[in-house]
Image: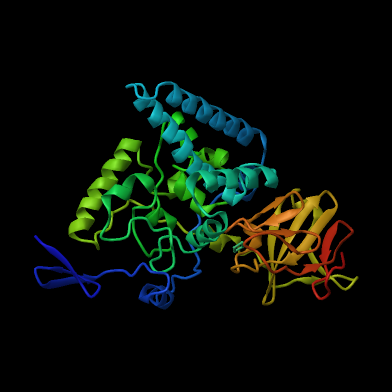
Amino acid sequence: MRLWLVGGCVTFGGFVKAELEDYSLVGAGKARAHDRGLVNAEWFLADVEPARMRELQERTNRRATIDTALWIGLTILAGWWLAATAWSWWSIPAMLCYGALYGGASDSRWHEMGHGTAFRSRRANEIIYHLASFQLFRGPTVWRWSHYRHHTDTIITGRDAEIVFQRPPSVWRTIFAFTHLQQENVLDHRYNTRTVYMNPLFRFLYSNMNYHVEHHMFPSVPYHALPDLHAEVKDQLAPAVPTTAAAYRVIFSTLARQHVDPTYEIELDVPEVESRRRRIDVGESNWVQHANGGIDLAAASSMDVGELRRIDIEDRTFVLGKLGEDEFILCDGLCTHANIHLADGALIDGEIECPKHNGRFDCKTGEPTRRPVTQPVAVYPVTIDGGRVVGHVNRKATS
Ligand code: FES
């Protein structure tokens, strides 16, 4: 059967089947995404106990240092092997190894360092991010912002510049984008992203990005904790694809179907569970005015060090954080980049990290300290009185 594209529609022998999506960021697809309510929208989140999530979000330099040293060392070794075997048959496996390490593995390093989660050290993340960008011929700034958008509007046509499988799809691009050939224009990563079980070698090369549903739901969890995160949430996701080969079988059969019918979508067995977002609405309606003029927010002992708690007072939202045994901070609760609740983020080295794009704010001043955040949040004074945390939400803190 012949397939034609006419005026954005797919036709089978003259019969109009369906309108194709417009993938341009400045075309009709952009307006359509807005009209459908798919822009900057609220996404499904799996449920993870807050204390467990704090453990998973912890940053360390150790693991990324070992992995990075190994990656660079193996790349140099493979390069030496390639040079030493030039023009012999041995140069073929040498070239494959070198290509996998220099090009393939640098993509996942670029990705992890761009999120700023691989190392605890921000400088180390930046150095490796720029190195990997150089290896991949990617402009570090443009791609950083492109990836923020990818996380805001994942596989939303007209919004996401990183949709590799534009329909009708191109088979040769398959190998470069493994994780997202699923459904388009849905607000649930379980439908547009896949998790694939891989052997340890592939997971090393891919920096655990095979746990891609988990990564998209919780970008503040570093790559080395993604297997543990998967164990926490797997019952709330579609079953993971069992092997890399099985994933490619699914991908190629889908591509074949979409060549005939670009509207074809993979069917997924996603369990019906409630999004966690509804469960973090912990605001109370009867806040007690404290004698010192502030508002009684919590018992100091009711929070763990490192915990962030969402506080809703009338129509205002705040985030209360515990930095130390007797040290609390109180800020506006919504990220100034895209109105995401900061209480879902992480407290790291005196900064609040937003859960959506890893932007950061200084806890004491509210000033932005990491892109894509550019505007500060207001910070409010907090006192401890009789073991109670008291917030003064009607006056700004002076740092
Ligand atoms: S919503 Fe983008 S950094 Fe917060």
Q: Position of residue 237 (x, y in %)?
A: 42, 49
Quarter of the picture holding the C terminus: bottom right
Along the viewing direction, whichever of 86 and 372 lies nearer the viewer: 86
Q: Residue at x 56, y 27 (%)?
A: 73
Image quarter for ligand 1: bottom right
Q: Residue at x 32, y 49 (%)?
A: 173
Vertical placement of 346 versus 376: above or below?
above
Quarter of the image for residue 69 reads top right
Quarter of the picture holding the N terminus: bottom left
In the rendered image, is residue 178 in sight?
Answer: no
- Apparent side of residue 126 relative to residue 72 in the rendered image (left or right): right
Quarter of the image for residue 131 reads top right
In the rendered image, is residue 386 in sight?
Answer: yes
- Apparent side of residue 389 relative to residue 268 in the rendered image (left or right): right
Along the viewing direction, whichever of 304 and 244 lies nearer the viewer: 244
Q: Position of residue 184 (x, y in %)?
A: 35, 62
Q: Residue at x 79, y 60 (%)?
A: 329
Along the viewing direction, whichever of 38 and 381 lies nearer the viewer: 38
Give the farthest residue toward the front. Answer: 87
- Apparent side of residue 382 relative to residue 269 in the rendered image (left or right): right
Q: How is the image coloured?
A: rainbow
Q: Position of residue 277 (x, y in %)?
A: 55, 61
Q: Position of residue 348 (x, y in %)?
A: 71, 49
